[in-house]
Amino acid sequence: MLQLKSVQKQFKGNEVLKGVDMQILPGQLIHIKGRNGSGKSTLLKIIAKLWAPDSGEVIFNPNVVVGALIENPNFIESESLAYNLKFLYSLTKRYDDNAINKIRTLCELFHLKYDQKIAMKKYSLGMRQKAGIIQAVMEDQNLILLDEPTRGLDEDSMDAFRQLLQKLIQNKKSVVICAHDGVEEIPFTHIYELKNGILYE
Ligand SMILES: Nc1ncnc2c1ncn2[C@@H]1O[C@H](COP(=O)(O)OP(=O)(O)OP(=O)(O)O)[C@@H](O)[C@H]1O
Ligand SMILES: [Mg+2]
């Protein structure tokens, strides 16, 4: 799906990534761990093309479509969940009945009410996080980047999240999860650690 070659990134002399090499293949469920400030979110932002590396290469297979939840998900705060998901979905795809059914199913899985009219600004941390996970997978994206996705999730939602991951991996999508805790029960296929700017397997 993707290959990183000697990816480097620094912020005003702070060398955060010192040459990261990594390959992501279809069907991999990857955990990147690392302490606060080790560069996990930076690496995901580079993979998501939000930031360019200072040097090195990020090589995508042509069929890759990235879905991402990185740090705090942004929504149109005065609008409902359904409005936001429709808006995001419609940027790339037609919001037909098929799409609505798929998104409803995802909302049900996470115990979110698709038809509820309350504004996103009134959502709890866990509810926002789940909405963020839904938007990262709802367009059938095949490379899914999740930064601390389990933050705020209760036990039922963790179960739902694990079910979703299993299905994604069965369908040969690739998932990269950055987190320092809260992911012990996820059956990762690969575990990496970012330390002093280097990614260790
Ligand atoms: N926009 C930025 N400008 C300057 N420095 C930054 C910026 N973003 C990140 N950094 C620095 O890069 C380093 C890595 O930050 P990053 O957010 O990638 O870490 P992280 O592993 O995701 O940490 P956490 O576990 O707290 O989420 C930190 O030292 C941080 O201060
Ligand atoms: Mg981070």
Image (cartoon, rainbow, N blue to C red):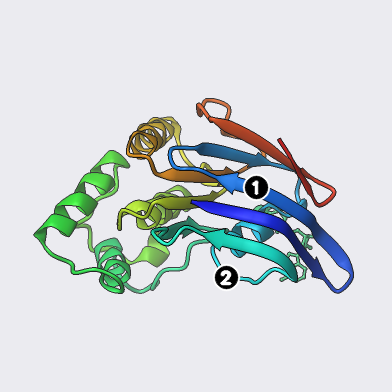
Image location of residue 42, percent across then percent down: 68, 60
Q: Residue 157 carries which label?
A: none
Is 30 rendered above or below residue 141?
A: above
Image location of residue 19, percent across then percent down: 78, 56
Between the C-alphas of marks 1 and 2, the distance is 18 Å
Is 13 rendered above or below residue 183?
A: below
Q: Residue 50 carries which label?
A: 2
Choose between 66 and 63: the one closer to the eye: 63
What amino acid is found at the position of numbered circle 1 in the picture? Met
Image location of residue 133, percent across then percent down: 41, 51
Q: In which quarter of the image is ligand 2?
A: bottom right
Choose between 85 and 120: the one closer to the eye: 85
Q: In which quarter of the image is residue 53?
A: bottom right
For residue 34, side relative to residue 149 (left or right): right
For residue 32, side relative to residue 124 (left or right): right
For residue 70, side relative to residue 108 (left or right): right
The residue singled out by tag 1 in the image is 22
Q: Does label 2 point to a residue whose CB lies under 8 Å from ligand 1?
A: no
Count of numbered circles on the image: 2
Image location of residue 179, percent across then percent down: 62, 42
What amino acid is found at the position of numbered circle 2 in the picture? Leu
Residue depicted at x 81% and y 52%: 197
Q: Earlier in the sequence, mark 1 or mark 2?
A: 1
Is 193 rendered above or below residue 41?
A: above
Residue depicted at x 27% and y 46%: 106
Is 140 rendered above or below residue 122?
A: above
Q: Does label 1 point to a residue whose CB lies under 8 Å from ligand 1?
A: no
For residue 119, side relative to residue 133 (left or right): left
Question: What secondary structure is marked by label 2?
Answer: loop
Question: What secondary structure is marked by label 1?
Answer: strand
